[in-house]
Amino acid sequence: KGCEPPPASYANKAVSDLAVWLIELDKSGAVVLPPAKPGSNRSLYCFTGGVTVGGQQVRQPTVFELDPSASVEVASASDTMNSCLVLQGKPIGEPVAQHGPFVMTTQQEIREAFMDYQKSQFGGWPWKTDSPCHPREKGRFAKYPDGREDAPK
């Protein structure tokens, strides 16, 4: 069982059909993704190892849209650990405006978010600089709740 979404979030509503799954398969592993609710979107991002999706070989890294109305098997096709991320949900049915780290529904809301950030840094930033917390030299990586780190090869 994953983490619960924030109580006032769209993700907390059953109609959202939101799912974020990290799939890790050893060399003999397989999992069947169940069908999603009608109207949902589902993407699969495979980033390590080699898998088959519905019997079709997939090379990493790759991302593609799955048919959310059908179940599909994701199975290991390599002798190493295989990792994939599934992102699923129903569209919110609102316009999307995006700039930098901000995603809102209008450009006006984007401007307001920038002004709010410039005024308060969203409640304050406890570090001496507003730069990212990780050094640029570290590059891209993922840190898991158990403390493991993974980086692209």
Image (cartoon, rainbow, N blue to C red):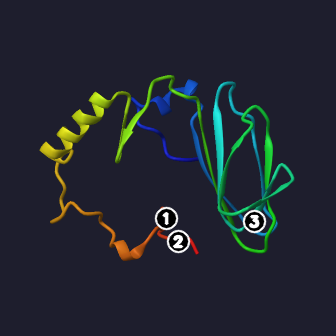
| In-image side of 129 versus 152 (left or right) | left
| In-image side of 62 versus 140 (left or right) | right
Q: Earlier in the sequence, mark 1 or mark 3?
A: 3
Q: Say what secondary structure mark 2 lies in.
A: loop
Task: Name the residue carrying label 2.
Answer: 151
Q: Residue 108, labelled with which disc?
A: none
Q: Say what secondary structure mark 3 lies in.
A: strand
Tell me if label 1 and label 2 are in contact, CB under 8 Å.
Answer: yes
| In-image side of 56 versus 109 (left or right) | right
Residue type marked 3: Gly
Q: Earlier in the sequence, mark 2 or mark 3?
A: 3
Q: Residue 50, labelled with which disc?
A: 3
Residue at image point 39% right, 39% down: 98
x then y, percent, for residue 22: 61, 54
Task: Name the residue carrying label 1.
Answer: 142
Looking at the rendered structure, the number of numbered marks drawn on it comes to 3
Q: In the rendered image, which quarter is residue 125 located in? A: bottom left
Disc 2: CA contacts within 10 A as few (<14), some (14-19) or many (>=20) = few
